[in-house]
Every structure is written in C-alpha cells, then in structure tokens.
Amino acid sequence: MYLSRISAPRLQGLVRQFPAVAVLWPPQSGKTTLVTRPFPHAERFDLAQSPLGTRPLPPTRSPPATP
C-alpha cells in the first residue's frame, strides 16, 4: 500500500529546477519509494552501495580543546 507523501510535490518542483537532487533521510524511511513513484526511470545513485559511501569523511571542524 502506497501513501502519498507531503514531500512528493516539493521533490517534483526541485527536479524541475535543478539537474540533480539529493534525497537524504534515515534508513528505511521511504526514500526509494518517494523517488521511484513519480520518476520510475530516473537514474539513482546510492552512496551506501558505492565505494564513496564506505570511506570515512574528513572532519568538518576541529574537536573542542580539553582544559
């Protein structure tokens, strides 16, 4: 059973404005369903299945100094 999501129209608007759109949500939250329902032939790139997804990212800022 598919329940339409509030974010589906927003996603469709973003796809019209930008050549690429990232859908980032927690695991098992319906990302694939959200994308494949309105865009069944869209190309998808899954970072979890990519070598890029397995590499640790560099830190974005220094950890706080300890007194």
Image (tube, rainbow, N blue to C red):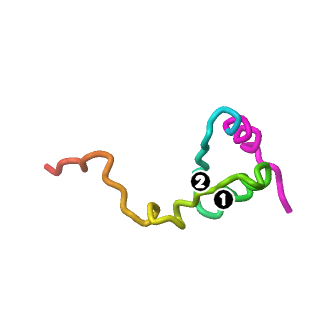
Disc 1 crowd rating (10 Å Cα; few below 14, some 14-19, many 20+) is few
Residue at screen point 82% across, 50% down? 4
| Disc 2 element | loop
Q: Nearer the viewer, residue 40 or 56?
A: 40
Q: Position of residue 6 (x, y in %)?
A: 76, 43
Residue 62 among those drawn in magenta: no
Q: Are marks 1 and 2 in contact (CB under 8 Å)?
A: yes
In the orientation shown, which residue stands out farthest toward the top?
17
The amino acid marked with disc number 2 is: Trp
Q: Nearer the viewer, residue 19 or 37?
A: 19
**Residue 65 relative to residue 14: left or right:** left
Residue bearing the label numbered 1: 29
The amino acid marked with disc number 1 is: Ser
Q: Position of residue 46 (x, y in %)?
A: 57, 60
Q: Which span is picked out in magenta? A: 1-14
Q: Position of residue 62 (x, y in %)?
A: 24, 47
Residue bearing the label numbered 2: 25
Residue at screen point 61% across, 44% down? 21
User: Which quarter of the image is occupied by the N terminus?
Assistant: bottom right
When asked about the image quadrant of residue 58, the answer is bottom left
Q: Position of residue 67 (x, y in %)?
A: 13, 49
Image height of 16 relative to 67, above or below: above
